[in-house]
Structures are given as C-alpha cells and as structure tokens.
Image: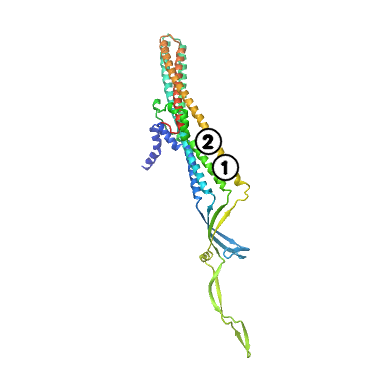
Amino acid sequence: MKKIALILLITLPASLIAQEKWSLRRCVEYAMQNNISVQQADVQARIAALQVKQAQLNQYPNLNFNTNLSLQFGRSIDPTSNQFTTSKFFSQNYGINGGIQILNWGKLKNTVSFSRFNAQAALEDMKKAANDIALNVANFYLQVLLSNEQIQVSEIQINQTQAQYDFTKKKVDAGALPELNLAEIESQLATDSSNLITAKAAYTQNILSLKGLLNIDAALPFDIETPPVESIPLETFGALQPDVVYQLAMMNQPEQKAFALRIQGAETNIKINKSSMYPSLSGFYGLGSAYNNQAIRVIGSQMINVPIGNVNVGGTNYDVYPNSPYVVNTYGKAPYFNQLNNNFNQNIGLTLSIPIFQNGNARMNYERSKLDLSNMQLQKLQADQTLKTNIYTAYANAVSSFEKYMVGTKQVEAAQKTYDFAQKRYEVGLLTTFELLTDQNNLLLAKLQQMTSHYDYIFKMKVLEYYKGEGLKL
C-alpha cells in the first residue's frame, strides 16, 4: 500500500496537468510565479532587501569575542606580567572588543536610504520581468490557438481535395476526363498533406515554447483551452490612444519606476561619498584577560628568625638575632581562573579620523557619483523616449493589423464565392482541374492570411494594454 501511495503522489501532478486544459489566465498567473527569469529577478530583490537590512544593522554598535593560544620560547614578553622572559611558557588571551560610530555626517543613514531605493528598484525589476513574461505567454498562447486553427483549415482542405479526387476518379474511370486531371489532384492532395504536417509541427513547437515559459517539463502532457477568438477581451482604439497610453505608462511601467528610484539612490550616493571627505568620530571599548602556565602565586608562609651574627663573651660564642623575625613565602602555580580574575582589564576611548591625503580617492569617488547621477538621468530620458516611440509604433502596428484583418475578411468572402462557383463549373465540365485547384489554393491562402492577421491584431492590442501598465485583460 505504501508503494502504491508513493506512485500516486509522484504521478498525480503529471496526471492533473494532462487532465486539465490551461486557460490564458492560468498560464499567465502560473508563469509569473514559476518562470525562471521571474524567479531570478525575485532572488535579486531578496538580495537587495538583505542589503537594506545590513545597512540598518551597521548603525548599531559591534561586539566581538576573541581568544588565542600560544606557546612562546626564547626572549618574549609575558602577557600576564608584561615583562621580558626567556622561559618557555604556554599562554592564552581573552578579549571582548567593540565600537560604535558617533559622528559620520549621515553616512550610515544615507547608506540605508541608498540601499532602500535600490531594493525598491529591484522589486520593480521583478514586476517588469513578470509583465514581460505575461506578454510572452499571451503571444505564444495566441500562436498555439492560431496553429490549431491552421491545422483545422488544413484538414478541411484535405477533405475537400479528397472529395474532388473521388469525384474526378469516377469521371476518369468513365472516360469523361483525362487521367491528367486525376494526377493534378493527387499532387494537390500531397501538398495539402504537407501543409497539415507543417501546421502540426508549428503547433508542437509553440506548445513547447509555452511550456518553457511556464517552466513545465517538456515531456509532460499539456493542452490549452481553445476559446472562440472573439471572446478574448480587447480594449477599443479610443481607450488605447498613444498619448493616453504613454501618460499611463510613465506612471505605471515598472521600468520607469525603477529608473526614478535609482536616480534617487544616485542622489543619496553623492551624499555618502561627500561624507567620506569629512572627519569621523567613533568610540571603542574592550574587556580582556590572560593566562600563563608559568605564573606563580603565594601558597603559604612561615616566620623565620635567622641569626645575623655572633659575639664571644668570656670565651663563649653567642648568636645575635634581629629584634623581630621576618616572613618567608612559599610559591606554587597560579590556578587558571585565578589568573583570569587577577588579569582582568578594561578599556574605553574615542577615535578621531581626519582624512588629509588619500591619493584623491574620496574626491574622485564624490565626483564619480555626480557623474553616475547624470548618467542615470540620461538613461531614464533615453528609456522614456524609447517607451514613447515603442507605444506609437505599437499603436500604428495595431491599426495596420486591424486593417489587414478587415481586408482579409473580405478576401475570404470573395475567395469563398469564387471557389463555390468554380466547384459548380468543374462538376459540369466547364472548368479545368488546374483552375479549380488554383481557386481552392487562393481560398486556403486567404483563410490562413485572415487568421494570421486576426491573431496578430489581437496581440498588437495586448501590447498596447501591456504598455498601459494596468495588466493584461485576460
């Protein structure tokens, strides 16, 4: 039972994808969450957010603990007594040190603002990546629908040619038509079959491209809904006038927002580099202690009264003692924790740093940051001009596609009438096979061109919706 459950868990996602048909909305929403480019942009936004957090933490005091072990020999300084010694000894030092910025002319505060502007810009970059993917998904979704309709038209074409073949074969067998007519239709049937194969290959390729954008395994089954093309919501040309779209794009497009944020960041960076040219004041503090395995301490004492000489009185020697005895100490190794307690030390102070000559680095960084701001402003100006050009171009393309679609619709109607008349004339022997096939191919080309223009028109309108920055109407 456990094995069966495991197999079901593994195969369930694939079976769900195989059973369900994906709508355009679902494809877009799924791609905006799972596409690799969007995920990469999300990672960059997360990194930028961490940089903001780091800049904020840099405003607080720092504290570090350190310890070291050493074996010293030869002439060296005893860290516990600070005296020269030639004895070999083992020592260990402990230290806790820290510092805090007191005066830096707003450098740390401005660094936080600079990082925050960059983080907000990174979020806009992620939105732009998601919007770009949404537009690409819509494009390939429409291409899949177009390829599917081309397959259906090609199949209808084959059925028509096959019916003509059957009709002509009867005529040829009856001797009413030459065999050349049958051969021409056989050639047309082969061409129609080739067109069907090409349409199916295009469909498969577009499906694979769509799955790639969705970050779905190419080996998994996948199918999309095939809604009537007329049901795809489109705004009117009146609502998509290029000047209106441009004004909305300037307010809503993530790329324009990102440029504006980075300009603010560049302005803040000028203040950061300027503060590096001024004196700074910081405080420091520390605690420490040390241990030496050769250190000794008094472990006991005794009173000693040693003679300081003797005198001879009447031929007899007598020892002479001082007025009071003196103390003689007994020494032993100092314990580890006793040494740490006795050698405990503290320090606190201020550090004033005044830049005098730094090979011009501070000044050059300051001047460079001002040029970076000018460059960023020019980049935004260029991006705004490019955006405006793209919007007006997209509008012109949309109008052109719409006109082609309308003309194509009329061409299909005319080609259909021509083919219907040709079919009737062919059946009564008033039209050659070559002329019939010519009219049939003209109808096929008109239908394919009309479908291509229709989907191209829809996509061009979606491009204008994209530039508005209000999301695609799905």
Residue 380's disc number: 2
As drawn, 19 above or below 44: above
Percent x, y of residue 380: 53, 36
Compare residues 235 and 156 and report the one nearer the observer: 235
- Taking the view exactly as shown, the residue that stands out farthest to the bottom is 314
Q: In which quadrant of the rendered view does residue 204 lie?
A: top left
334 left or right, relative to 237: right
Residue drawn 53% across the image and 42% down it: 267
- Taking the view exactly as shown, the residue that stands out farthest to the left is 1
Percent x, y of residue 455: 44, 25
As drawn, 39 above or below 426: below
* Residue type for callout 1: Ser
**Label 1 vs 2, first from the N-terminus:** 1
Percent x, y of residue 13: 40, 37
Compare residues 474 and 427 and report the one nearer the observer: 474
| Residue 36 in view in this figure | no
Compare residues 182 and 235 and report the one nearer the observer: 235
Percent x, y of residue 237: 44, 26
* Residue type for callout 2: Lys
Compare residues 84 and 471 and report the one nearer the observer: 471
The residue tagged 1 is: 369
